[in-house]
Image (spheres, rainbow, N blue to C red):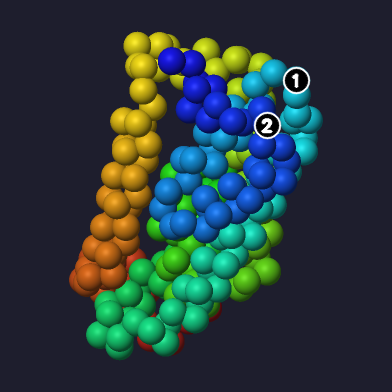
Amino acid sequence: MDFVDLFPFAPEVGYLSLSLVNFFGSLVPFVPLPGFLLLATMAVGDQFDLHVLALLSAVTATIAKQIIFYVSYGGRKIINEKTRKRMRPFERLVKRYGAGAAFFAAATPIPDDLVYVPLGLAKYNPKRFFIATLTGKIVLSYSIVFISHYLGLSLVEPFLENMDDATPIYIGIMIFGVMMTSVVILLLRLDWGRILGRFAPWTLDENNED
């Protein structure tokens, strides 16, 4: 199986369909892989403009992540006070390094919502969040596009050459999403005051709300 077999319809979807798939894929927390794979597949060959692919991917993903950020921003009213009290030290930690954390999460293929949700809960500056996230997504999107286009996915296809069916990959993506969701639930249940009190005692200061 070739890498393009993961998305056999990729050459026909066009820019608009890529934007929709990437937006709604990015809107689902903790499962970024489908959008990455589609972008990489469309970057193979010369049918699409690489700059348009990268910028569309970056912008649509950033808009989706901004929505997740705002939902988390308002989620402070949904989470009960006991959980909020446990989370406050962690919120202060990510808020202090907000722009750098948002950029790093956006520029790497890690589950970035693990950073974005706490930033929203901590009421981090929305404009700074948007700029940092967009910049990071541009870096990541261009990296995916150029690697896919110029290396011909030679680094990935050897892992797929003995596979006849892409179903295990799709199942793996779903399992990965469930695992990341479980991690977020764990983050909400941990006693961050006890954990961070040893390494970053300033996060326990109720007056430290910069």
Which of label 2 and label 1 is nearer to you? 2
Q: Which residue is mark 1?
A: 46
Q: Residue at x 44, y 66 (%)?
A: 117
Q: Is residue 128 above or below residue 75?
A: above
The answer to whether residue 106 is left or right of residue 187 is: right
Q: In the rendered image of this protein, does residue 85 appear above or below residue 165?
A: below
Judged from the image, the secondary structure of the residue bearing numbered disc 1 is loop
The residue wearing badge 2 is 12
Instruction: Please provide percent x and percent y for residue 193.
Output: 26, 74
Q: Earlier in the sequence, mark 2 or mark 1?
A: 2
**Residue located at (48% from left, 68% from top):** 119
Q: Would you say the residues marked 2 and 1 are in contact, meaning their CB atoms lie under 8 Å apart?
A: no
Whether residue 9 is visible: yes
Quarter of the image that includes the N terminus: top left
- Work out whether residue 161 or residue 143 is closer to the camera in this orientation and state it: 161
- Residue 49 lies in what quarter of the image? top right
Residue 85: give x, y in percent of width and height: 30, 83
The quarter holding residue 63 reads: bottom right
Image position of 28 (left or right of 84): right
Q: Residue at x 49, y 81 (%)?
A: 74
Q: Is residue 139 visible?
A: no
